[in-house]
Amino acid sequence: MVTHDFEMSSLGSETGLAIRQRLDVIIALLLRLIESDGAALSAKEQILMLSNLGLRPVEIAGILGKKTGYINKELSGLRKKGGR
């Protein structure tokens, strides 16, 4: 798993934030390219994939442009169904 929090504190806060924003955009674009059975991944599939990669709900929300509460609700539902 790759996270981008590891040395952001050693960078200037503006530089670290700019890098993080660009990485979030790259991840979001790559998720849109991934297909499952010939169709784009659903929001739930994207959330599950990012969660399984170790991203926190707040990070997933930032990448997908959703509210953290929505991400937490979806993750809770997926856990109840055994999706994780």
Image (cartoon, rainbow, N blue to C red):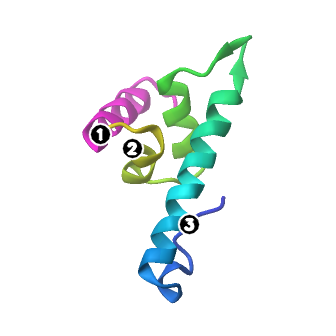
User: Which residue is more in the foreground, 21 or 35?
Assistant: 21
Q: CA separation, marks 1 and 3?
A: 21 Å
What residue did someone put label 3 on? 19
Amino acid at circle 3: Ile
Q: Does the magenta segment cover residue 75?
A: yes
Query: Which is more N-terminal, label 3 or label 1?
Result: 3
Q: Percent from the top left, x then y, of residue 78?
A: 43, 28
State the extent of the magenta-drawn residues as a range: 67-84
Identified at 59% across, 56% down, the residue is 23
Q: Considering the numbered disc 3 on the image, is that residue within a helix, a strand or a loop?
A: helix
Q: Locate residue 23 relative to residue 47 in the image: left or right.
A: right
Mark 1: few/some/many CA within 10 Å (<14, 14-19, 20+): few
Q: Percent from the top left, x then y, of residue 83?
A: 51, 28
Q: What secondary structure is the magenta-colored segment mainly?
A: helix
Q: Residue furthest left?
A: 69
Identified at 43% across, 23% down, the residue is 81
Q: CA separation, marks 2 and 1?
A: 6 Å
Identified at 51% across, 71% down, the residue is 5
Q: Considering the numbered disc 1 on the image, is that residue within a helix, a strand or a loop?
A: loop
Please name which of the two marks, 2 or 3, marks the residue nearer to the observer.
Answer: 3
Q: CA separation, marks 2 and 3?
A: 17 Å
The answer to the question of whether label 2 and label 1 lie on touching residues, with beta carbons closer than 8 A, is yes
Query: Which is more N-terminal, label 3 or label 2?
Result: 3
- In this rendering, the answer to whether 47 lies above or below 24 is above
- In this rendering, the answer to whether 61 lies above or below 37 is below
Could you say which disc has been placed on residue 61 in the image? 2
Amino acid at circle 2: Ala
Amino acid at circle 1: Lys
What residue did someone put label 1 on? 67
